[in-house]
Amino acid sequence: MSRHESAELERLALRLEDGDAGARRVAVMELAELAYERGAAALLLSALRDPDSAVRAEAARAIDEFPAEELTEALIGVLTGADDNVRGAAARALADLKDSAAGPALLAALDDATDPFVVAAILRALRNLRHEPALQAGLKLLAHEHPAVRQEAVGLLGYLRRPETMGEIARVALSDLAAEVRRQAVAALVSGEPQTVGPSLVRALADPDWQVRAEGAYVIGKIRIPGSVAALVTATGDSSWQVRQKAVEALGQLGAREALPAIGRCAADEISNLRKAAVTAIGEIGDLEGRRYLEPALHDADPDVRKMARWALGRLGYPSLECSTRSSAL
């Protein structure tokens, strides 16, 4: 008697029981093409438990083809397995969940989870679902011993965008021992009120890790933190060009005319991406004083820098300068 409504699924079910691991692996590959047929998900789950690692790996690759909502509870169980390929694929699939109805099952699993990998994966899924009932769990897990869990807890709180959590996120941004957690916390502060999160973001510009400093400068520009210009000007001399670039971009977004000399120095930096950012910032600020830094950029070795210099000069009211420069070059 057939176990499946589809003859094709029935055929694959038999092949998944074949004694040859190679045949089972090919069956999994074909199963992925039938992912939305009724009963296909159950066959995939059996393949994820196959005794052969190559078959399990193929099943893990196929997970992305299946509707994750049908597999939620099973994927949570797979997270605790011994096969890293399968665990990783299950974590990615859970992160892609779109149906908020999966939230309660994830939150219940979080209560029982002890493995940091499992906890982090569930937090990531709850974050992407913006599951509001997970707020308290996120706050509690900010104190977890494993940095990957703290990082995902911060990410969850950042996605929920609740004003009452911004103070805790700011504390983590400044005090966590792991740089990746501090960076995530700084990024999450983009949802905060400038007056509330501003001091923490300015202090992040002095963080020992360049990625945290760069993230701080980016967020300052994004939400336009008042009183941050002096710290950003200092950051234009940072040892990391990525930090210098984000600081320059933030100064442009803030329209900081008093920062033009610092931005102008960056317009002559050896890093072309930084020169382009500086030229763009000068155009955004729109002060005529910026012309002295833009004219040399018209002859920059990087065509993108030259293009932005022409745009910036146009913003300053010198649209004819591009034409005269071209004429003199001829």
Image (spheres, rainbow, N blue to C red):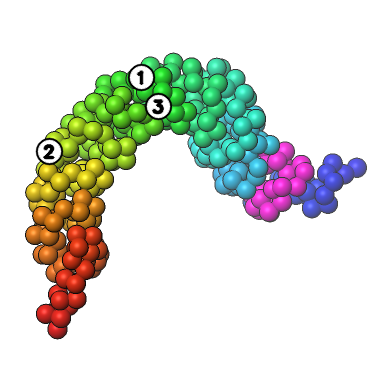
- Residue located at (24% from left, 39% from top): 217
Magenta stretch containing residue 212, yes or no? no
- Residue type at numbered disc 2: Thr
Query: Is residue 92 shown to the viewer in this render?
Result: yes
Q: Which mark is residue 154?
A: 3
Q: Amino acid at mark 1?
A: Glu
How many residues crowd around disc 2 within 10 Å: few (fewer than 14), some, or many (20 or more)? Answer: some
Alpha-carbon span between mark 2 and mark 3: 28 Å
Secondary structure under tag 2 reads: helix
Q: Quadrant of the C terminus?
A: bottom left
| Residues at circles 2 and 3 in contact by the CB criterion of under 8 Å | no
- What segment is highlighted magenta in the picture? 23-46
Q: Amino acid at mark 3?
A: Val
For label 1, the residue is 168
Residue at 12% over, 43% down: 258
Q: Nearer the viewer, mark 3 or mark 1?
A: 1
Q: Position of residue 89 (x, y in %)?
A: 54, 40
Q: Residue beneath label 2, please?
A: 234
Left or right? Give the position of 291 relative to 249. left
User: Which comes before the other along the chain, label 3 or label 1?
Assistant: 3
Q: Residue at x 58, y 43 (%)?
A: 60
Horizontally, residue 151 falls left or right of residue 282, namely right
Instruction: Give SS at disc 3.
Output: helix
Q: Toward which corner of the image does residue 256 lie, by quadrant?
A: top left
